[in-house]
Amino acid sequence: MRLDEKLNASSGVYFEGTLIESLQTPYQLIEVFDTADLGKLMRIDGANMTSERDESFYHESLVHPAAIAHPTPAQVLIVGGGDGGSTEEILKYRSVERVVLAELDQGVVDIARKHFRVVHRGALDDARVKIRIGD
């Protein structure tokens, strides 16, 4: 199956992949594809969210600039991020005592736990992490 995502009026990306799970939640359609180049790929409502092989480009550049701007980050709020990649990155800081992960959709967390351990590396189950589901 070809997965197309238009980025703007004149460009986009596509991947070839096999659908391995689809979950329609009250909020969105979450799909997991197996791709040759990116490994497992999560799409939400037809948009690419994360993949096993390129997630570090997104999560590292999102987390580390903010974390190093603070002398000793101890308590962290992550809004969204149910795939756990940002949580995994922030837990690399020894000063972090508590992370609250606020996610709208339990389905994203469930899919991440099932298919994307390579992304969160167990961070979703770390004792310092509290996951709060809701709007």
Image: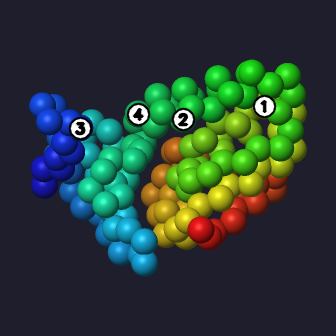
Q: Residue 76's image quarter?
A: top right
Q: Hey, what amino acid is under mark 2?
A: His
Q: Element under label 4?
A: loop
Nearer to the camera, 5 or 89: 5
Mark 3 is surrounded, within 10 Å at the Cα level, by few (under 14), some (14 to 19) or many (20 or more) other residues, namely few
Q: Position of residue 135 (x, y in %)?
A: 59, 68
Q: Hey, what amino acid is under mark 4?
A: Asp
* Residue at numbered disc 3: 7
* Residue at numbered disc 4: 54
Nearer to the camera, 54 or 5: 5
- Against 8, is 101 above or below? below
Q: Earlier in the sequence, mark 3 or mark 4?
A: 3
Q: Earlier in the sequence, mark 1 or mark 3?
A: 3
As measured in the structure, the alpha-carbon distance from the residue carrying label 3 to the one carrying label 4 is 17 Å
Q: Hey, what amino acid is under mark 1?
A: Tyr
Q: Element under label 1?
A: loop
**Residue 114 in view here:** no
Q: Element under label 3?
A: strand
- Against 40, is 90 above or below? above
* Residue at numbered disc 1: 93
Q: Element under label 2?
A: helix
Q: Position of residue 119 (x, y in %)?
A: 52, 44
Mark 1 is surrounded, within 10 Å at the Cα level, by few (under 14), some (14 to 19) or many (20 or more) other residues, namely some
Q: Earlier in the sequence, mark 4 or mark 2?
A: 4
Q: Position of residue 115 (x, y in %)?
A: 45, 58
As measured in the structure, the alpha-carbon distance from the residue carrying label 4 to the one carrying label 2 is 9 Å
Residue 59 is marked as: 2
Residue 69 is marked as: none
The residue drawn where x is 54% and y is 35% is 59
**Residue 112 in view here:** yes
Contact between labelled residues 1 and 4, with CB atoms less than 8 Å apart = no
